[in-house]
Amino acid sequence: MSAKHKLIETITRLLNLMTEGITEFDVELVKSDLDLTDEEHQNLEQALSALRGRLNTLSTAAEEVAGGKLPTSVFPASERDRLGIAFGKMLGNIRKTIAQVDAGANALGASETNLADTANNASDAVETIVAAFGKVTSHTFSQLASIKQVKTELEKLTQLIPDMSDEIQQIVQSIQDEMDTIADASQESAKVTVGLRLTTNKMLDQIDRIVVSSRGLRGMSLGLRSTLAPYILVNNELREKTIRIAYLPIADHLVLPLTYLQQMKITNGLPLKLLRCSSWPQLIDHLEDDADGAMILSPLALKIFSDGLPIKAIMSVHRNGSGLILSKEIDGIQDLPGRIVAIPHTYSTHNVLLYLALKNAGIPYGAVEVMRAPPPLMPYFLQRGTLDGFVSAEPFPEVALNIGAGDMEFLSKDLISDHICCVLVMRDHAIKRNPENITRLANIFIETGKSIAENPANAAKNVAPFFGVVPEVMERVLTSPSDRITYDDLELRQEELFDFGKSMVDMGLLRDIPDIDEMLRDEFFREAMSF
């Protein structure tokens, strides 16, 4: 057999093995049989070895993915490596999908906890009401019995003394008339009491349904977590370098989950761990314990920094993004004295915005009853008449509009143009441990902010599992109007923090304005902009 035929036979065998999907093969290239020079033989052997290694790499990666090890990295050999590129994209999309499902499981778990807490609190309140109603009922029917007894005794009195003087008869008649009036009032009170008892029974039924819904969500959450258990998104090596960021599911924090999904898709993405919180106190707990940083209200950041928590402000994470929603029964902010308005937190941007809006309208802050409430529940409290208005971050003002609970009095951008709200703060130990990754994170936030402006519909769709709202609601928040909330200018400036600090001092929330020079570490943002 000629050398040419030998070469063709070898190549044919190799191609047949690859066609059959065999990645571990041993094809010998005999130099003498193929009439090859030493250099030609060496080049062929190297090429064959590289091919064998590449196929083994892809098959090993596929086996790891099948076993749930999603951090596996496959780098394309070149720009023409369509298989490697496709494999990398596939891995990225799988990681992104798993991350979104995981976020959905976390959201369900948080909803279950909130519903359970709501049910417990409502149950305690209803028990108190029932006890009070019991006392009212007992008093009402005792009163009716007493009135009946008095009227009976009066009738006996008139029978015993038939020749009463006109004056005494008038007195007796007056007493009888008064007893009749009291009896009528007691009967009305009894009707109201019965109605209230029926209402409490309905409330208890609703609480039972909340408990059932809560258990259903718990089951769904546990089921999703059980399904996700075999899938590993971050390996042990990356876990030690992971940056843990606490956040809330609000539009203010949109860049964080979008950044997380984008980094999950790419090879060697920045390792992030998202700590989803349902309240600002829970976020502070994380920041004091296991979080490296957090997205936090700028007034709250000023407060905890002045209290001595070792944090630094790195950058803004959005601008604008809040609104004042009023009940449909209220004509405007001028009607707020004596009314109840909810805010998310005492040390919130929204409390400062309310203070400034009332000040502009000539209304003392103390003329309005300001209470704290969970933002996700604010639209429904407003709908039921528990509140007269609320100030919060999106998407909850938009949710209130969507369910017809109230009207938008103003968007925060119309009160203070391009104002800051939430900022990224990092613990001092996290900055010292890996300052390069802080700069890298700031750069990715900047790029993510630009992508939101370029394609808000896509951003709304991707983030929906994290926020628990339909994409259409989030898209309206991002587009109606276009500057309702923005992410294209994330630089945090000293004077902006100072202005909030001054307002907080005016409100009695701070004794003095903290040292802004010490608190702000804007060099990370400047370095990130130079990438």
Image: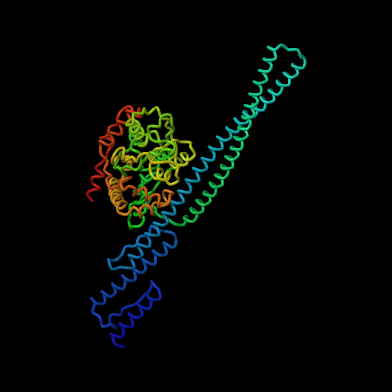
Give residue 153's quadrant in the image.
top right
Residue at 40% x, 27% y: name it: 367
Frontmost residue, 92 versus 361:
361
- The image's colour scheme reads rainbow
Position in image of residue 262 (x %, y %):
34, 54
> On the rendered image, what quadrant is the N terminus found in?
bottom left
Residue shown at 25% from the left, 41% from the top: 522
Q: Position of residue 226 (x, y in %)?
A: 50, 54
> What percent of the width, then of the height, locates residue 218?
52, 48
Residue 320's x, y, as percent?
Answer: 32, 42
- As rendered, which of 37 and 318 lies closer to the eye? 318
Is residue 115 left or right of 42 when viewed as pictured?
Answer: right
Outermost left residue: 530
Kindly give the residue lying farthest to the front in the view shown.
166
* Outermost residue to the bottom: 1
Q: Which image quadrant for residue 502?
A: top left
Residue 42 quadrant: bottom left
Q: Is residue 292 left or right of residue 498?
A: right
Instruction: Using the image as rendered, state which of residue 78 and residue 237 is in the foreground.
Output: 78
